Image (cartoon, grey):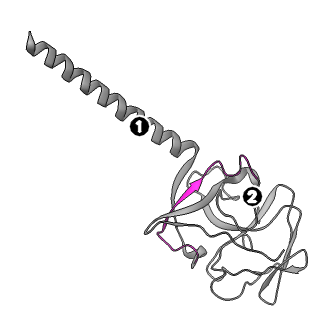
C-alpha cells in the first residue's frame, strides 16, 4: 500500500515538472515571436557603434505604440527582397517621412540643415552618385554608421524603407557584455 502512494506522488511530481517546463518553453517562444528577438550583427556597416558578431535584443513592439525616430537603430526587411525571410538589414534611421536628405562636402543635410552625427565612423559621408532624395510619406532613409563600409540607402535601387518593413528597434547588447544602446542626439 505504501509503495502505491509513493508512486502516485512521484508521478504527480513528474507531471507538474513537465507542465512547468512546457509552460516556460511556450512563454519563451511567445516572447521571442511577438515581443523580443535576439539578433547578431552581420556586417561592419554599423561599426564602431555596433561591432560584427555582437548580440543584441530587438523590441518588436517598439513601433506598434510609437513612431520611429531619427537615430533609432532598427532591423527591417530589405526593400529589394521584402518576401525573403533571410533578408533582414541592420541600420540607423537618418531621414524621416517628408524630408529632403542631401549630401555635400562629406556631410548629411536634412531640409538644407547640417545633421551633426557623433556616431559616424570611417571617412566622411559620400553620396554614391545621387546628392538629394525626397523621402516619401511613411518611408525612412537608412544609413550605416561606418559610412565607408555600409551598403545602405545611398546605393539601393529602392532607397526608401516603408514603415511596414520595420521589424523592430535594437535596444540592448547582451554579448559580449550587457550594454544599452545609447540614443543619438541631433541638432535638428
Image quarter where the C terminus lies is bottom right
Q: Is residue 174 left or right of residue 66?
A: left
Q: Is residue 66 left or right of residue 85?
A: right
In the image, residue 141 sits, relative to residue 126, either above or below, namely above
Q: CA distance from mark 1 to mark 2?
A: 32 Å
The reply to whether residue 42 is visible in this rendering is: yes
Question: Mark number for residue 114?
Answer: none
Question: Mark number for residue 68?
Answer: 2
Q: Residues within 10 Å of mark 2 (few under 14, many from 20)?
A: some
Q: Is residue 178 magenta?
A: no
Question: Mark number for residue 24?
Answer: 1
Image point 89% across, 62% down: which residue? 98
Image point 58% across, 42% down: which residue? 34
Residue 21 in the image, given as x and y percentages of width and height: 35, 35
The reply to whether residue 157 is visible in this rendering is: no
Q: Residues within 10 Å of mark 1 (few under 14, many from 20)?
A: few
Where are the magenta residues, as a range?
49-66
Residue 124 in the image, given as x and y percentages of width and height: 71, 88
- Front-lying residue, 162 or 21: 21
Amino acid at each position: 500500500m505504501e509503495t502505491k502512494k509513493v508512486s502516485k506522488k512521484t508521478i504527480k511530481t513528474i507531471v507538474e515538472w513537465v507542465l512547468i517546463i512546457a509552460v516556460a518553453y511556450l512563454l519563451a517562444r511567445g516572447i521571442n515571436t511577438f515581443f523580443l528577438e535576439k539578433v547578431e550583427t552581420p556586417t561592419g556597416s554599423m561599426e564602431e557603434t555596433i561591432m560584427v558578431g555582437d548580440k543584441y535584443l530587438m523590441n518588436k513592439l517598439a513601433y506598434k505604440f510609437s513612431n520611429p525616430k531619427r537615430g533609432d537603430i532598427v532591423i527591417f526587411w530589405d526593400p529589394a527582397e521584402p518576401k525573403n525571410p533571410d533578408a533582414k538589414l541592420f541600420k540607423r534611421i537618418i531621414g524621416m517621412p517628408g524630408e529632403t536628405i542631401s549630401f555635400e562636402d562629406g556631410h548629411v543635410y536634412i531640409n538644407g540643415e547640417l545633421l551633426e552625427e557623433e556616431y559616424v565612423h570611417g571617412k566622411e559621408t559620400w553620396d554614391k552618385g545621387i546628392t538629394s532624395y525626397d523621402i516619401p510619406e511613411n518611408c525612412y532613409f537608412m544609413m550605416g554608421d561606418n559610412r565607408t563600409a555600409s551598403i545602405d540607402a545611398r546605393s539601393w535601387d529602392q532607397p526608401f524603407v516603408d514603415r511596414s518593413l520595420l521589424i523592430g528597434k535594437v535596444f540592448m547588447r547582451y554579448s559580449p557584455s550587457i550594454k544599452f544602446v545609447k540614443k543619438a542626439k541631433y541638432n535638428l
